[in-house]
């Protein structure tokens, strides 16, 4: 996996704070302004941790991953990646998918309805491209759980969006009860947390956030029992792009 001078090597050194201070700060600034570069870093980080979970890294590289996770307080991600890797056979994926397909269909229909409402609300002769405030006030996004090597969901909120409902599809039924939902930035900082109640027949759980509270960048959402937040049930990733 080592390839000095490559972008992967640059990302690895950035995550482990191995770059000179000026380069570290410069890359951090670029990541805030360049959504594509941020996507690439997120993809590298995901595969890097997955490779560690699969035992594909050298001892030195594995130690780098462990140090990075410890420094950012994310050691649970390695255990999660190992669990997902062990449970990622095609047969299991096929049996789990129907449990959240209904939720996916509902969200897609909701998004299509929003688009149609925004289109109808715009007068035929208008050249404005911004949807009406009523149409763009709320927006729903479905996130499906997956392995850390899955590409994060890319999200761009419509202009004027004030509130976002993040629907977390469940890949298996959960015992009824209270669950903790934490939203973390790529750096591992918790930017929002909620406690929700899961019904016996739930196919998804939701967290509502104000659009202004999420800056463009890479995020993960962690789902765990409220009584034991470290016992991760599912992880969801997405990249939020700035509106054009």
Image: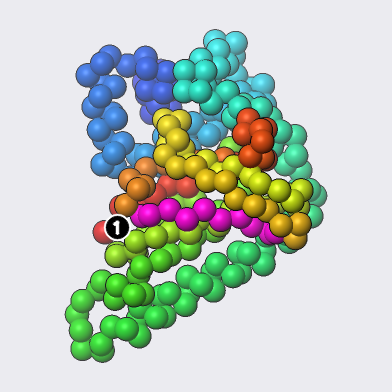
Residue 241: x %, y % from top left? 35, 51
Quadrant for the C terminus, please: bottom left
Residue 210 magenta:
yes
Residue at 35% x, 70% y is 136
Q: Is residue 71 above or below residue 137?
A: above
Q: Is residue 74 above or below residue 93?
A: above
Left or right: residue 187 compared with residue 22: right
Residue 211: x %, y % from top left? 36, 55
Residue 9 magenta:
no
Prevailing SS of the magenta stretch: strand
Can residue 224 be seen? no
Q: Compare residues 3 and 84 and report the one nearer the observer.
A: 84
Residue at 64% x, 45% y is 179
Left or right: residue 45 compared with residue 25: right
In the structure shown, which secondary structural element does the residue marked by tag 1 occupy? Answer: loop
Q: Which residue is mark 1?
A: 243
Residue at 74% x, 51% y is 176
- The span shown in magenta is 202-211
Q: Compare residues 110 and 40 and report the one nearer the observer.
A: 110
Residue 242: x %, y % from top left? 30, 52
Residue 13: x %, y % from top left? 39, 19
């Amino acid at each position: 996996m080592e390839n000095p001078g490559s972008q992967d090597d640059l990302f690895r050194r950035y995550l482990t704070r191995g770059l000179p201070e000026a380069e570290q700060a410069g890359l951090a600034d670029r990541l805030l302004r360049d959504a594509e570069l941020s996507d690439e870093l997120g993809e590298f980080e995901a595969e890097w941790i997955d490779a560690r979970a699969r035992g594909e890294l050298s001892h030195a590289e594995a130690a780098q991953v462990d140090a990075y996770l410890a420094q950012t307080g994310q050691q649970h991600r390695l255990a999660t990646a190992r669990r997902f890797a062990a449970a990622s056979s095609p047969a299991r994926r096929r049996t789990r998918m129907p449990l959240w397909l209904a939720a996916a269909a509902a969200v897609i229909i909701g998004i299509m309805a929003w688009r149609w409402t925004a289109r109808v609300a715009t007068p035929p002769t208008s050249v404005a491209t911004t949807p009406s405030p009523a149409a763009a006030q709320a927006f729903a996004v479905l996130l499906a759980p997956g392995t850390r090597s899955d590409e994060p969901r890319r999200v761009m909120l419509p202009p004027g969006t004030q509130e976002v409902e993040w629907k977390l599809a469940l890949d298996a039924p959960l015992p009824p009860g209270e669950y903790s939902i934490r939203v973390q930035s790529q750096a591992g900082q918790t930017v929002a947390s909620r406690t929700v109640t899961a019904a016996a027949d739930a196919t998804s759980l939701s967290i509502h956030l104000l659009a202004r509270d999420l800056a463009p960048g890479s995020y993960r959402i962690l789902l765990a029992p409220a009584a034991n937040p470290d016992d991760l049930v599912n992880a969801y990733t997405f990249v939020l792009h700035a509106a054009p």
